[in-house]
Image (spheres, rainbow, N blue to C red):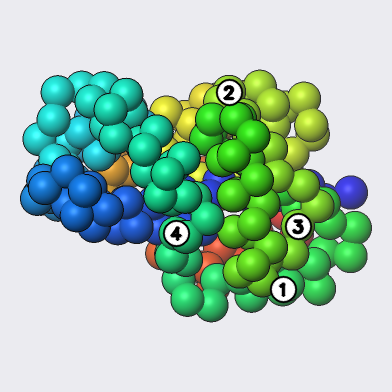
Amino acid sequence: MTVIASDLDGTVCEFLHGAAPLVTKIFGLQPDFNNLYTPPEFYTTSKLMDDVFSLPAGTFKKEMEPFLVNEMRLFKNLPRLEEDNYLLTRMLYNHFTDLKLYFITARDPDPLPVADTYYWVNNNGYEYDEVFHIENKASFCSYMGINLMIEDEPRQIIPLYQNGVNVIIMNQPWNDHIEEVKNKPVQLRRAYNWQDVFSLCKEILG
């Protein structure tokens, strides 16, 4: 059986540019996207938003994200990272006849964000077997026998690779310091769009 998993925010859906306009509208802050181009070693979604809005560390996660998620229903209304990237899931199922395909997100596993996450993937045309809300993706992927993970966050990418999981890095400014590893048995490969992801899945998994 072939088991592939994908992150959501920054990989399939557009968290940064979906949330930033709401922060501006509600809190009156202006983003500076130039802060994306000098990434720290490990990036989290909340730290990313703190940097974009020049906030003290932890401010977005504590003071803004709960309102955006619970009142504005952010996870229900995010744009897709690419307009037609839902086609990737269909093509993967067509190519790998024994495929299990999961979405794995580090979002809070509270009932409302979980419900809105399911609504988003279903309403946007993705095919999948299950959605999991998991912080430690490396351990989970090893436990679930996942062959390959599509991910953008360095704090997830490095442990996944170290745990023997192939990783396709969805290119973002905060992960461009990670070098590809093309030698088998475990690979780190970079993709710039969903067509790249499909090609790399076929190349890595055969």
Asked whether the residues under the numbered discs 4 and 1 touch, taking CB atoms below 8 Å apart as contact, a structural biologist would say no
Q: Which residue is mark 2?
A: 136
Residue 132 picture location, percent across and down: 69, 37
Classed neighbour count for the residue bearing mark 4: other residues with Cα under 10 Å, few (<14), some (14–19), many (≥20) = some
Q: CA distance from mark 4 to mark 1?
A: 23 Å
Give the mark nearest the N terminus, 4 or 3. 4
Is residue 98 visible in this depiction of the protein?
yes
Residue 86 picture location, percent across and down: 61, 70
Give the residue type that dot 3 points to. Answer: Tyr
Give the residue type that dot 2 points to. Answer: Asn
Compared with 154, 77 (above or below) is below
Instruction: Say whether residue 63 is left or right of residue 116.
Output: left
| Pair 3/1: label in front | 3
Residue 51 picture location, percent across and down: 17, 36
Label 2, secondary structure: give it.
loop
Asked whether the residues under the numbered discs 2 and 1 touch, taking CB atoms below 8 Å apart as contact, a structural biologist would say no
Compared with 90, 159 (above or below) is above
Give the residue type that dot 1 points to. Answer: Met
Q: CA distance from mark 2 to mark 1?
A: 28 Å
Q: Which residue is mark 3?
A: 128
Residue shown at 32% from the left, 24% from the top: 62
